[in-house]
């Protein structure tokens, strides 16, 4: 019994080390080869582990990429944990500004692997579904924030689910614009998005100028 108890943690440790080796190697391969050219064979070869060993830890290439990107997504998910309880409209605006700006900065910081992930989203149903689940979590979080703002009298009455979806899909689009280096003025585009969210385009008291 003592012998088995001693070996079990060692086997577990070796397994964890192998799993990390595969993920670290896969990250290098994905960054150098891109999504479509990355194969399990290339990962196993560079990691110097058996082909079957890779499959003993992961379901396949998509599973590996999702696990690699989850480390990045964890930083995005941390934003969901930021408390939203503004006492004033200005506090609400500042909170949303910081959340959006941080999202763009994370996209900029992790641009190389996010480019690989974008390629994968366009080619893999499972990867696309994974990202869809991520955006849905942010839509749900935004809906709760909007509900709080309405309850406290900080927001107008509107369809919370629709507005939350529109808001997150807009931010999502700009995240990929940042990833693809089509938007570099992060503070500027954040301000525009927040202005849209809090003020809109049109002046309800405005009159047509001649």
Image (cartoon, rainbow, N blue to C red):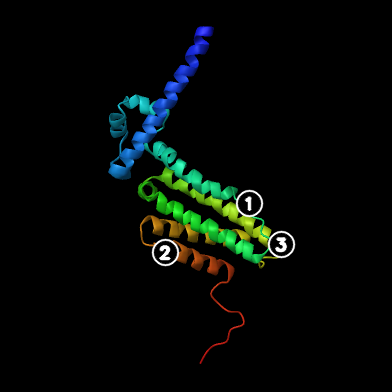
Q: In the picture provided, is 116 more to the left or to the right than 204?
A: left
Name the residue that disc number 2 marks.
185
- The single residue placed furthest to the right in the displayed view is 152
Name the residue that disc number 3 marks.
152
Q: Position of residue 5 (x, y in %)?
A: 52, 12
Q: Position of residue 166 (x, y in %)?
A: 53, 61
Which residue shows up at 71% across the image and 61% down it? 151
Q: Secondary structure at mark 2?
A: loop
Closer to the chain start, of discs 3 and 1, is: 1
Name the residue that disc number 1 marks.
83
Does 31 sit above or below residue 103?
A: above
Kindly report the distance in space between the C-alpha atoms of the residues bearing marks 2 and 1.
27 Å
Mark 1 Cα-neighbour bin, 10 Å: few <14, some 14–19, many ≥20: few
Residue 36 seen anywhere in this rendered image of the structure:
no
Q: Secondary structure at mark 1?
A: loop
Closer to the chain start, of discs 2 and 3, is: 3
Q: In the picture provided, is 173 more to the left or to the right than 42?
A: right
């Amino acid at each position: 019994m003592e012998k088995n108890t001693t070996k079990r943690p060692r086997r577990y440790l070796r397994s964890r080390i192998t799993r990390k080796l595969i993920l670290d190697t896969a990250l290098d391969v994905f960054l150098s080869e891109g999504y479509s050219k990355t194969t399990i064979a290339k990962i196993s070869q560079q990691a110097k582990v058996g082909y079957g060993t890779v499959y003993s830890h992961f379901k396949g290439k998509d599973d590996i990429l999702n696990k690699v990107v989850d480390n990045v997504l964890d930083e995005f998910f941390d934003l969901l944990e930021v408390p939203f309880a503004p006492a004033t409209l200005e506090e609400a605006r500042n909170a949303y500004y910081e959340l959006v700006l941080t999202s763009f900065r994370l996209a900029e910081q992790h641009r190389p692997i996010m480019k690989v992930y974008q390629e994968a989203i366009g080619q893999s149903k499972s990867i696309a579904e994974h990202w869809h689940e991520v955006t849905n979590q942010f839509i749900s979080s935004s809906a709760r924030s909007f509900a709080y703002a309405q309850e406290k009298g900080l927001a107008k009455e509107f369809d919370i689910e629709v507005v939350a979806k529109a808001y997150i899909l807009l931010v999502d689009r700009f995240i990929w614009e940042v990833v693809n280096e089509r938007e570099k003025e992060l503070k500027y585009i954040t301000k525009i998005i927040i202005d849209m969210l809090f003020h809109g385009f049109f002046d309800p008291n405005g009159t047509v100028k001649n």
